[in-house]
Image: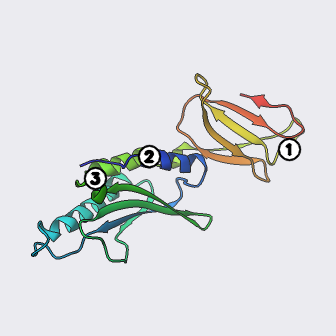
């Protein structure tokens, strides 16, 4: 079996970069799994295998993803025949987000629940990676709201994060520890880099 579907890691990374997925988000792994009686005249295999993979995923998530507020649940709607579909869901400012991580229907294989949990742990933002900064002017205690802050890789100059400060001149980003080039720019001020 495999870990993530193609593109899932990039989608999660984009949500982190845009600030809609934080380390504080209440996450749900929604697992649609087949509950049809097996074996039967038309279905082979064991219905217990689906239940076992679901409980194994719950256990792996509990052991690997304990840094986050995470629940694993089956949706209330009727599952499709042969399904073992895993979707990460959360809400940000009342708006729901969904990223499909794995599809047995699409890849025709069972997931490695350990690899799935480990892959998710590697891409989710961690509280330790949260940086809160404030943009100030030369005047004492004057913060700059709506300042545009760009965080770049110092070698390639690739933009890692781009954010605007809030009313108090504060901004919050999640990035792994390391060396970065940070540029702040506000209307009426000269851009400063550090």
Residue 123 visible (yes or no): yes
- Horizontally, residue 18 falls left or right of residue 60, namely right
Q: Where is residue 57 in the image (x, y as percent from the top left)?
A: 28, 59
Binning the other alpha carbons within 10 Å of mark 3 as few (below 14), some (14 to 19) or many (20 upward) gives few
Residue farthest toward the front in the current orientation of the protein:
42
Q: Which of marks 2 and 1 is nearer the N terminus?
A: 2
Count of numbered circles on the image:
3
- Horizontally, residue 26 falls left or right of residue 173, namely left
Q: Name the residue under label 1.
A: 141
Q: Distance between the residues labelled 1 and 3?
A: 57 Å
Q: Mark 3 points at which residue?
A: 107
Give the answer, above or below, for where 107 lies relative to 39.
above
Assign a secondary structure to mark 2: helix
Q: Mark 2 points at which residue?
A: 9
Q: Which of marks 1 and 3 is nearer the N terminus?
A: 3
Assign a secondary structure to mark 1: loop
Q: Do the residues labelled 2 and 1 touch (CB within 8 Å)?
A: no
Residue at 36% from the left image edge and 49% from the top image edge: 5
Assign a secondary structure to mark 3: helix
Nearest the eye: 75 or 166: 75
Q: Earlier in the sequence, mark 3 or mark 2?
A: 2
Nearest the eye: 26 or 49: 49
Binning the other alpha carbons within 10 Å of mark 1 as few (below 14), some (14 to 19) or many (20 upward) gives few
Give the answer, above or below, for where 6 lies relative to 47.
above
Q: Which of marks 2 and 1 is in front?
A: 2
């Amino acid at each position: 079996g495999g870990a993530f579907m193609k593109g899932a890691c990039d989608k999660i990374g984009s949500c982190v970069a845009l600030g809609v997925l934080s380390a504080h988000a209440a996450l749900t792994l929604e697992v649609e799994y087949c509950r049809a009686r097996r074996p039967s005249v038309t279905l082979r295999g064991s219905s217990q295998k689906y239940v076992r993979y679901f409980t194994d995923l719950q256990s792996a998530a509990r052991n690997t993803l304990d840094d986050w507020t995470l629940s694993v649940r089956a949706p209330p709607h009727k599952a499709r025949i042969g399904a073992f579909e895993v979707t990460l869901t959360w809400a940000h400012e009342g708006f729901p987000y969904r990223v499909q991580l794995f599809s047995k229907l699409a890849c025709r294989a069972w997931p490695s629940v350990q690899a799935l949990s480990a892959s998710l742990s590697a891409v989710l933002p961690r509280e330790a990676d949260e940086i809160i900064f404030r943009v100030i002017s030369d005047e004492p205690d004057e913060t700059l709201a709506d300042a545009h802050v760009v965080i770049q890789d110092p070698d390639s100059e690739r933009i890692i994060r781009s954010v605007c400060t809030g009313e108090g001149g504060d901004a919050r980003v999640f990035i792994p520890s390391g060396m970065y080039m940070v540029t702040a720019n506000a209307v009426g001020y000269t851009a400063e880099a550090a």
